[in-house]
Amino acid sequence: MKLTWLGHSAFRLEESTGTTVVTDPYHSSVGFEMPKVDADVVTVSHNHDDHNNIEGVNGKTVLSRAGAYEIGGVHILADRTYHDDKKGAKRGENLVFKYRMDGVDLCHMGDIGEECNAFLVETLMPVNVLMIPVGGNYTVDAKQAKEYVDRLMPDVVIPMHYKTKDCDLDIDKVGEFLDLFDDDNIIYAESDTVEFDRADFDGEVTKVLVLDKFSD
């Protein structure tokens, strides 16, 4: 399967059959424009401006509620979580999406704000590729994200929702998250698009994949 980072928390996921999913498309309020893309499915973790630009994606089914779905051969599970550490009292609910594409289990944490807990970990595992916010303020911060990584034990973790070169949001840069890992386990991708095959995963150590070429 193929994964393309579109900026912020938006990714385009493509199965070998051609079925495509776009996660959390954003409005220009983040500081830059969302690329124009097509998709069969758009998943929206919550109804905030930097995650709900469904109009910016062409030709799609929108999933924005908890449940289990199967579209075009892709299995999708949406679990209800919280956008904050006050059980939603500050920022409401958040959906965590899990996708199975070409035998690869991918998990997009949306704007997860609650601390890691055993119930959520048990619900989500196993995870091959984890997309998790690391910028803090509106979501978990670097240390809290690292706890999710340690508990979920993905083969690959992709940080998202952090301060990039043109981002106007009051969130941290990715460096604080990367500092929590050994340099040998951090990979800086040469492209915003990467491909994953289940045979590539050995389960021995989590690799951090940075898709932002301007990251520090």
Image (cartoon, rainbow, N blue to C red):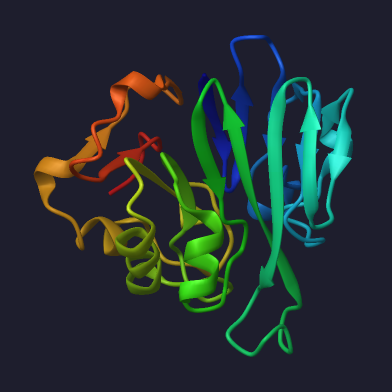
Q: Is residue 216 above or below residue 54?
A: below
Residue at figure coordinates x 59%, y 10% from the top left: 16
Whether residue 10 can be seen here: yes
Residue at figure coordinates x 79%, y 57% from the top left: 66
Residue extending farthest to the top is 17
Q: Position of residue 212 (x, y in %)?
A: 40, 38
Whether residue 34 can be seen here: no
> Exactly how many numbered labels are in the figure?
0
Which one is nearer the viewer's eye here, 126 or 109?
126
Residue at figure coordinates x 34%, y 69% from the top left: 147
Q: Position of residue 116 (x, y in %)?
A: 46, 74
Which one is nearer the viewer's eye here, 170 or 49?
49
Q: Is residue 70 above or below residue 39?
A: below
Q: Is residue 4 left or right of residue 66?
A: left
Q: Is residue 202 left or right of residue 122?
A: left
Residue at figure coordinates x 30%, y 22% from the top left: 200
Q: Is residue 64 left or right of residue 25?
A: right
Which one is nearer the viewer's eye here, 93 or 171?
93
Q: Position of residue 124 (x, y in %)?
A: 53, 55
Q: Position of residue 9 (x, y in %)?
A: 59, 48
Residue 94, quarter of the rendered image: bottom right
Residue 189, quarter of the rendered image: top left
